[in-house]
Amino acid sequence: MKEHNDVRRIFLLNPDPRLVRQAVRAGVQVRSIRTDATDEAALRAPLAEAAEAGLCVNPARALVVLSAPAAVQRLVRDNRLSPGGTEVAPGDLRLTVETLSVHGMHQAVAIVARTPYGLLHPAPLTADTAAEVRAVVTALLDLTGYQYGPAHSSVALTPRGPVITGCRSGLGDDPVPELVKAAGGLDLAAGAVEVLAGRLVDTVRPNRFAAAALISPPWRLAEAEVGGLPHVRYVSPPEAPHPGHLVVGADSPDVAARRVASLRALVVGDDTRPGTDR
């Protein structure tokens, strides 16, 4: 028997705590299971039960493919999604692409560049190149049969075009969500809960650049002090031996790079740091 449909509910496989927290804040009920996502047979029964209860679920096969990097690469290769093969060079620009899918429609909501100093969003791409990147990622998700939820893809920008190097279901690792929010106000976790509930999410275009840098401990300044510095939008303090990270806003990629360099030097106490950009 189907459950009442007047309460917003979502289904989570091996639930991400960030999505669970967002669902609680939004008043959304969560049904979840923990199981081996590479075992298609083990997935079928709980997915069928969730679907029968009226929840939005992905096909078991889609989840299996996206949980196995080798399967993703095989799909890319067999369908010629990446021009000239899947090999990339050390100097190729590395990107990550965050998507939100609902009813099999995929929105590429963020393209983040990996730079020598950290992460930058939006990636400094031409409109045509950004469109190519979005197209190849959404084509891959179509081929997997993915229907609902967030996905995180890795792409290398080669002279031959964008090459997919990986794709998995779920949100990008921190600090990607904080970076996306700082650049344009898009809350990835909130958007993910919406699409998992079967609702469309309005596209939010970034209105400025944001950069994120990992900074190893020890920090000379406390979290509150770092958060009070100019242009800092988010701070996660280190927990030794793990680094912390900070997110800064800027009006251009060059300014973002200078601000990260200045703040990194200030936070770790490097006396040779450049002057802080204001």
Image (cartoon, grey):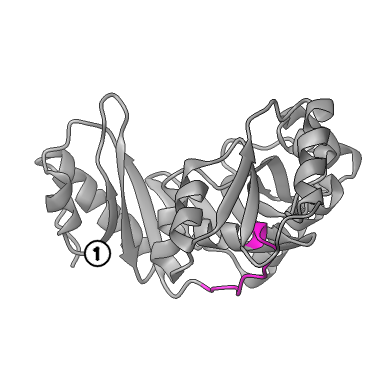
Residue 6 in view: yes
Residue drawn at x 24%, y 41% as measured from the top left? 237
Residue 61 point in image, percent of width and height = 84, 38
Vertical order, 104 against 127 (above or below): above
Figure quadrant of residue 168: top right
Q: Which of 4 and 223 is in front in this view?
A: 4
At mark 1, the secondary structure is loop
Magenta span contains residue 14: no
Q: In this view, does 25 lie above or below 13?
A: below
- In the rendered image, residue 199 lying in the magenta stretch gets the answer yes
Q: Is residue 63 above or below residue 108?
A: above
Residue 214 horizontal side relative to residue 94, left or right: left
> Which of the 4 quarters of the picture holds residue 219?
top left
Q: What stretch is highlighted in magenta?
A: 195-205
Location of the C terminus by quadrant is bottom left
The one nearer the camera, 46 or 166, is: 46
> x and y percent of residue 126 in the render?
61, 68
Q: Name the residue under label 1.
A: 231
Q: Kindly identify the residue that appears in the image at 70 percent across and 61 percent down.
A: 4
Query: Quick check: 169 left or right of 253?
Result: right
Image side of residue 151 versus residue 268, left or right: right
Residue 93: x %, y % from top left: 57, 48
Q: Extreme front residue here?
A: 1
